[in-house]
Amino acid sequence: MNAHTKTAFSRRPTDRPVAADVRADLLKDPGFGKVFSDHMVVIRWTKDRGWHDAEVCARAPVTLDPAAAVLHYGQEIFEGLKAYNLSDGTIALFRPDQNARRFQQSAARMAMPELPEAVFLQAVDELVKIDTAWIPKGDGSLYLRPFMFATEAFLGVRPSHEYLFMLIASSVGSYFKGGEKPVTVWLTDRYTRAAEGGTGAAKCGGNYASSLLAQAEAMENGCDQVVFLDAAEHRWVEELGGMNVFFVMDDGSLVTPPLSGTILPGITRDAIITLARKEGRTVREERYSIDQWRADAASGKLKEAFACGTAAVVASIGKIKSSAGDIVISDGTTGPVTSAIKARLVGIQRGEVADEFGWVHRI
Ligand code: PLP
Ligand code: COI
């Protein structure tokens, strides 16, 4: 399979698509990650043949040997990106090339083969085109989930010799149940997400598996997400379970934790930094401690905080809860800087604000 020319995808559309009226009903209020489209993409990789047998087919369960390496040693990576219906009738993706590259970086970290960027992009185009009817109108989008896992039936511990790349799509609305309401986050003092030299910068399933107990603790405490601190000093704010984090200071500047190798290099994070600097705002990618967060919230130096990511877009953080007490940021409502940043980003993603960085990929 060539990295630069168009790959031949065989197309076997489903003969049992979901009926239009049932689909329309599902799209009214899809929530997040529960409503799935009719098709999927599958591409195989074996050590002797490389990438082969790319196909677009009916969405269906996968058959795996019980000894498949992924089931034992967790060799799995994934991505997340969205397709939007724009008001001019076209369909667009936001920076899909960045997802293709991060997928390659995750693969490299997990000792997996790299899918050529052109093949990743073609897979996304193929699925969006065949499942266009599943993109909600209005505020919703089609969340695309590319993933890859080790399928070789072998219990020895070494990189697998066989993999499956798959791409599925889910019609989604807001990630958080409360919609636009500011989220509350739980500061875990028991668990860490990633240590130096580990897999924190890779989008691998294992990072999420190890975050689930902390996420469950967050939910038990009435919070939407968990905030992780660094593994060495338990002091520096890293990121949330599934989002990067920004702080808005009283001078209008932004602070966000640096890409130290232990957090995910978010594409939304990068877009926000680029947009904020372009409009003359100072953005510091520097370490920010939980003690500072507490002190700045108390003194009023910290005006706003927000989480960002593909699924969550931009979500204002109103409050942090922890065993040491709560921190409320300003009056706990969404601040003007967070609102403006969100409006600009969403405007670009939806084709309503000029795309000066060439981020919008039309299909
Ligand atoms: N951090 C984590 C742990 C994530 O799962 C995500 C979501 O993808 C992000 C950050 C944000 O990344 P992106 O903006 O590329 O979606
Ligand atoms: C995404 O934003 O795409 C993610 O993978 C994060 C997850 C919380 C859904």
Image (tube, rainbow, N blue to C red):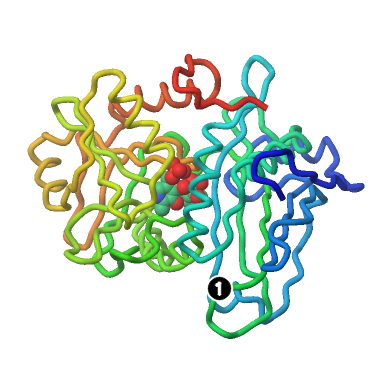
Going 67% across and 21% down the picture, which residue do you hit? Answer: 90
Looking at this view, name the residue that lies furthest to the bottom. Answer: 156
194 lies left or right of 93: left
296 lies left or right of 332: left
Seen from the viewer's position, the closer of residues 203 and 243 is: 203
Going 32% across and 51% down the picture, which residue do you hit? Answer: 239
Rendered location of residue 2, percent (x, y): 69, 46
Going 27% across and 57% down the picture, which residue do you hit? Answer: 187
The part of the image, by quadrant, that contains residue 169 is: top right
Give the vertical position of 331 relative to 201 (above or below): above
31 lies left or right of 57: left
- Res. 177 visible in picture: no
Tell me if the residue at label 1 has its CB under 8 Å from ligand 1. no
- Res. 165 visible in picture: yes
Local secondary structure at mark 1:
loop
Query: Label 1 amino acid?
Result: Pro
Rendered location of residue 64, percent (x, y): 73, 73
**Disc 1 marks which residue?**
159
Rendered location of residue 360, percent (x, y): 54, 25
Crowd rating for badge 1 (residues with CA inside 10 Å; few <14, some 14–19, many 20+)? some
The part of the image, by quadrant, that contains residue 86 is: top right
Give the vertical position of 352 relative to 53 (above or below): above
Going 50% across and 43% down the picture, which residue do you hit? Answer: 175
